[in-house]
Structure formats: structure tokens, C-alpha cells
């Protein structure tokens, strides 16, 4: 650790400047965000009239995005907390990747809710007139708590790396050097500091698990307590949690491949990591598949009139192409790919991760929209556009902008901070060499 400038691990894991591909990537994301911001300005000026949201389809792709962001954020507790507490050391190179995905996703989950409100100036009413009987106030509480814990789990393991980064004054530049010193100048690599942070990380890892389960359970209650076909289910909490674990793990597979490829991290994110994460994704996909079967099979046995219309719309009706794509892409095809050892190689794992994430987004869309268009009381004497929901370009632009914004946060984090923990990697490497 003394000769940092000569340490191969340190040099490999230091943040790298954007190359040409990175610059193009950032410009594209900024352009998408700019279009989304323009669309949001139109929405603020003209109101929600610019959207396709109406009396029946009062939630659309904004809430789909919210549920998706909340779901993918669960990966922080899966990789950082569950695997850390179970003493799974192979996950060390993935912990920071998982945490930054969690922080960026949960941040934009909060933002997209404000977008969906239409009147952001009334957000303060939630705090001045909130009722503890409402799942909405509990959702705000657990989201804020989860964000706070995730930030701490991201920051505490970063402290020893900040000490390393401060030592490279010539490479950092003035503003980065000031940032590193502001965040970690107090860190002296003293045993007492490591003892305190290790204890804090363990406490946070234990705390974040029930909070993570709570955030997805409470989010599911926003739907299940409304007494609508498709949402009137006691299975919804477990259904949401299992799906969140799956999409989060799929997101990590994608990030692993991208960072490994573009930052030349083959020595640190190895084929073995893809093999193990691939097995985790198969397990989570099978669990989520079970809850999906349970979610649709029980109403199918009862086949109430309103439930029948909802199920037929999903299985054979207007939503069936999206439904079968979502089921196949998020669960069936990834299982078929990753269940074989060759399928758990980096490229195939990357492809399976993309399928999981894309399929999971459409799955969230199907949780929201079909139910709203199949209420218990049939629609009568309403304009035709009330009976369908096709998002306007403003909605697509804002939703796309939020997704691009989350990716920008991850991109800039990887440019400023080590995406793989340097200090932990050095310690583990030295312990392996001594063994």
C-alpha cells in the first residue's frame, strides 16, 4: 500500500478519462435528457393535458418508470448487504457497481413521482397534510430512508479509496482533487477508523434489508389497496420483491460487462463472476416466474367477470403481444440462456441481462395500464380516448430522459470514483497471496 504509484492494482482501477466512445455516450444521454426537460417544461406550462392520462388511465408510463426504478434499486441490498453478511467474497468487485445503480435508481424514482403529480408546487402538502393511514406517506418515508442508507453504504467503503485518490494530485486536476479532499481528507487509514466503518457497514447492511423489503412491499400496497382487478391480491408484496431482485441482478450483469469491456477490467471482473451472477439470475428468474404463475392462476380459477376481462386482455387481447414479450424476455429466455455454463460467459450474460431489464420495464407497464383500463364498474358514456392509453411524445421524452439521467449519474460516478473498490481488492489479493 505504501508505493501507490507502483501498485498495479491501483493503476488498473483508477478512474479513467472519457475516450471518444465515452464522450459520444455522454452527449447522447445529455441530448435525451434535454429533450425530456423540454417536454417537462411543456407539461408544466400546459398541464397534464399534454399527456394521454385521463380519468381511467390516471397512471401511465410515469408510474411504470417509478416502479421500475424502485425495483432495480433493490440490487444494492442484494449485492452489498445480503452477500456481504453471508461472507460471499466473490461479490467484492460488484458492490460499488450495485450501490451506484441503487442510488441513481432510487433518486430518479423520487423525481418521476414529482413529474407524475403535475403540480410539483403541491408536493409539500404531502408533509403538511400526510396521513399515516395512507401507503403513499409510508412510501415516501421508506424511499427516503432507503436512499439515505444506500448513500452511506456507497460512501463508507469509498473512504480508503479517497485516501488513495488524494495521493495522485498530478492526475486528478484541481477540481477533482478538491472534491476528493472534501470527501475524504479526514481519513488517515488508522485501525480505529477501519473498526468504526466496518461496524457501521455491518449495521447498515443489516438495516437496509428490512428497509428494502419494506419499500417494495409498501409500493405494492399502493396498488393492492385500491381494490381493482389485477391488483386485488395478497401476493403483491412478494411478487414485487421477487421481480425487483431479478431486474436488479440483470442490471448488474449489464454493468459488469460494460465496465469490464471499456475499462479493461478482465482481471477483476472475471468469467467466474459472470458464472456466479448468471446462476443468481436463474434462481431469481425461477422465483419470479413462480410468483407470476401464482398471480395469474388464482384469479383464473375464480374467473370473476372483471378479472376475466383483465386476464383475457393480457393473454389473448390487446396487451397480449407486450405480455408474452415481457414474460419471455424477463424470465423464460434468460433462464434458457443462463442455465447452461456457456450461456454464463460474458457476452451471453450481457445479452440475458438486457433481456431481463427491458422485459422487466414492460412488465411494470403491464402492472399499471391494463388494470386501469379494466375497472370493476364498466365504462359508459365516455370519450373514446378514455378507453385506451397510448403515451404522448411528451411522456416518452420525459420517461426516456429519466432513464438517461440515471445512466448519466452512473457514468459520471465511474469517471470520478473507482468503480471497483481499490483498497478491498488490494487486501483480498494480498490475503490470497499469503494463503
Image (cartoon, rainbow, N blue to C red):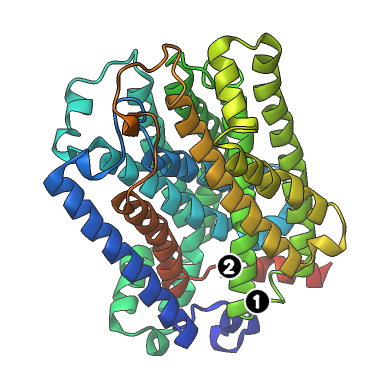
Q: Quadrant of residue 273?
A: bottom right
Q: Nearer the viewer, residue 121 or 196?
A: 121
Query: Up-down: is 104 above or below 136?
Result: below
Q: Secondary structure at mark 2?
A: loop
Query: Up-down: is 415 above or below 285?
Result: below
Q: Quadrant of residue 403?
A: bottom left
Residue 265 image label? 1
Query: Up-down: is 344 above or below 433?
Result: above
Q: Measuring 45% from the left and 12% from the top, which residue is drawn there? A: 376
Q: Nearer the viewer, residue 190 or 38?
A: 38
Q: Measuring 33% from the left and 44% from the top, which residue is drawn there? A: 112
Sequence-wise, the earlier of marks 1 and 2 is: 1
Q: Measuring 42% from the left and 81% from the top, which residue is drawn there? A: 24
Q: Nearer the viewer, residue 337 or 374?
A: 374
The location of residue 296, given as percent across then percent down, is: 66, 23
The location of residue 162, given as percent across then percent down, is: 44, 69
Label 1–label 2 contact, CB within 8 A:
yes
Report which residue position mark 2 lands on: 420
The location of residue 53, given as percent across then percent down, is: 31, 36
Q: CA distance from mark 1 to mark 2?
A: 9 Å
Amino acid at each position: 500500500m505504501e508505493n501507490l504509484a507502483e501498485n498495479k492494482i491501483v493503476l488498473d482501477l483508477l478512474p479513467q478519462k472519457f475516450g471518444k466512445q465515452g464522450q459520444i455516450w455522454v452527449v447522447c444521454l445529455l441530448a435525451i435528457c434535454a429533450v425530456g426537460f423540454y417536454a417537462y417544461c411543456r407539461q408544466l406550462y400546459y398541464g397534464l393535458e399534454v399527456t394521454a392520462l385521463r380519468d381511467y388511465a390516471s397512471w401511465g408510463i410515469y408510474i411504470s418508470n417509478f416502479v421500475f426504478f424502485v425495483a432495480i434499486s433493490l440490487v444494492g441490498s442484494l449485492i452489498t448487504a445480503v452477500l456481504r453478511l453471508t461472507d460471499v467474497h466473490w461479490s467484492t468487485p460488484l458492490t460499488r457497481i450495485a450501490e451506484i445503480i441503487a442510488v441513481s435508481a432510487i433518486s430518479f424514482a423520487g423525481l418521476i413521482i414529482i413529474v407524475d403529480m403535475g403540480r410539483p408546487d403541491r408536493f409539500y402538502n404531502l408533509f403538511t397534510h400526510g396521513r399515516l393511514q395512507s401507503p403513499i406517506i409510508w412510501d415516501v418515508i421508506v424511499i427516503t430512508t432507503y436512499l439515505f442508507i444506500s448513500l452511506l453504504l456507497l460512501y463508507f467503503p469509498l473512504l480508503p479509496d479517497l485516501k488513495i485518490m488524494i495521493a495522485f494530485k498530478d492526475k486528478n486536476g484541481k477540481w477533482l482533487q478538491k472534491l476528493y479532499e472534501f470527501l475524504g481528507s479526514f481519513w488517515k487509514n488508522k485501525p480505529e477508523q477501519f473498526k468504526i466503518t466496518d461496524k457501521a457497514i455491518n449495521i447498515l447492511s443489516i438495516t437496509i434489508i428490512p428497509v428494502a423489503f419494506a419499500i417494495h412491499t409498501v409500493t405494492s400496497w399502493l396498488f393492492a389497496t385500491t381494490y381493482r382487478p389485477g391488483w386485488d391480491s395478497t401476493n403483491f408484496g412478494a411478487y414485487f420483491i421477487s421481480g425487483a431482485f431479478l431486474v436488479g441482478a440483470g442490471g448488474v450483469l449489464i454493468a459488469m460487462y460494460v465496465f469490464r469491456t471499456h475499462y479493461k477490467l478482465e482481471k477483476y471482473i472475471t468469467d467466474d463472476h459472470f458464472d456466479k451472477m448468471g446462476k443468481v439470475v436463474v434462481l431469481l428468474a425461477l422465483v419470479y416466474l413462480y410468483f407470476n404463475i401464482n398471480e395469474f392462476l388464482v384469479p383464473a380459477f375464480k374467473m370473476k367477470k372483471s378479472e376475466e376481462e383483465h386476464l383475457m386482455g393480457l393473454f389473448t387481447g390487446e396487451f397480449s403481444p407486450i405480455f408474452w414479450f415481457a414474460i419471455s424476455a424477463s424470465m423464460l429466455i434468460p433462464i434458457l440462456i443462463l442455465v447452461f455454463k456457456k450461456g454464463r460467459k460474458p457476452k451471453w450474460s450481457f445479452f440475458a441481462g438486457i433481456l431481463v431489464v427491458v422485459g422487466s420495464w414492460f412488465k411494470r407497464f403491464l402492472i399499471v395500464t391494463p388494470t386501469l383500463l379494466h375497472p370493476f364498474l364498466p365504462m359508459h358514456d365516455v370519450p373514446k380516448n378514455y378507453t385506451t392509453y397510448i403515451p404522448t411524445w411528451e411522456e416518452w421524452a420525459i420517461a426516456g430522459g429519466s432513464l438517461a439521467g440515471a445512466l448519466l449519474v452512473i457514468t459520471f460516478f465511474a469517471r470520478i470514483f473507482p468503480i471497483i473498490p481499490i483498497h478491498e481488492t488490494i487486501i483480498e489479493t494480498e490475503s490470497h497471496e499469503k494463503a
